Structures are given as C-alpha cells and as structure tokens.
Amino acid sequence: MNLIRKFSLILICSVVAACIEASREAPPDISAKYAGKVILYSTSWCGYCQKTRDLFAQNGIEYTEYDIEKSVEADEEFKKMGGRGVPLVLANGRAVHGYAPAAVLALINAKE
C-alpha cells in the first residue's frame, strides 16, 4: 500500500508540474487585450486544434478562435507569444502551446 501511495504522489506532482511548465506568461499587451477571455489560435486543418475545440465544447468553455493562416493580426500575436505550432490557448494571462488538455483546463479554471 505504501508503494501505491508513493507512486500516486509522484504521478500527481508530475501532472501539476507539467501543467505549470506547459503554460507560459503571455506578453502584457496581449494579456490585457484579452483579459477574462479564452483565445484559441489555430488552423482549419489541425487535428489537435479540433481536439481543443472538442475539449472546450465538452466542458462548456466559451472561447474566441483565430485562424493564424487567415488573420495577419492573429499570426502576429501568435508569433509574439512564441508560437511555433498550433493549437495555442491563451487564458488568464498565460499561453499553453500545443495540445495539453490538463494544462488548458487547469489554466482556465485557475483563479487570478
């Protein structure tokens, strides 16, 4: 039983650490522009972007989506946040790069 508790604790710590590491502080001007909103930077063809949309739908999360291939402004913001791949989710002043459901949900549900 003790071994199971240790393993569980290690697993929980790993998940929390991954969630913290997965999100990075967004530039202040972009954070201020979208304060209180969830933003998804995506492309139309990206499978992980679709999984992120599904995640939002399953959890009743309202969001605004910007296709970085169709919007110059969105692409500039995406690059300013260090975006190299989609999806990129912005919430509570932090950005999650890539498909990381636990990190995205933790970020959205975090209290400022």
Image: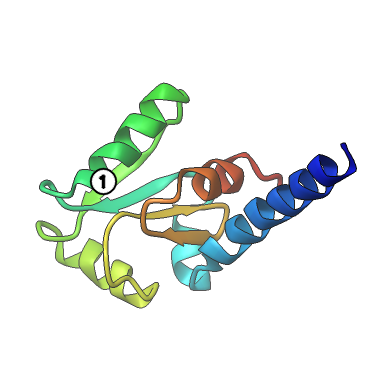
Query: Which part of the image, by quadrant, shows the N terminus?
Result: top right
Q: Is residue 77 left or right of residue 28?
A: left
Picture quadrant of residue 77: bottom left
Q: Nearer the viewer, residue 14 or 47?
A: 14
Residue placed furthest toward the right? 2
The residue at 66%/45% (across/down) is 110
Count of numbered tags: 1
Is residue 71 something one can see in this rendering?
Answer: yes
Q: How is the image coloured?
A: rainbow
Above or below for 111 versus 93: above
Picture quadrant of residue 73: bottom left
Residue indicated by mark 1: 49
The residue at 47%/70% (across/down) is 29
Above or below for 6 versus 27: above
Judge the density around disc 1: few (<14), some (14-19), many (≥20) Cα neighbours within 10 Å. many
Is residue 112 something one can see in this rendering?
Answer: no
Above or below for 111 versus 82: above
Q: Position of residue 16 (x, y in %)?
A: 68, 53
Above or below for 7 versus 27: above
The residue at 38%/48% (across/down) is 39
Q: Nearer the viewer, residue 34 or 10?
A: 10
Q: Nearer the viewer, residue 23 or 10?
A: 10
Type of the residue with mark 1: Cys
Question: Which secondary structure lies at badge 1?
Answer: helix
Q: Position of residue 65 (x, y in %)?
A: 28, 44
Q: Is residue 18 left or right of residue 98?
A: right
Q: Position of residue 98 (x, y in %)?
A: 36, 58
Q: Position of residue 87 (x, y in %)?
A: 30, 54
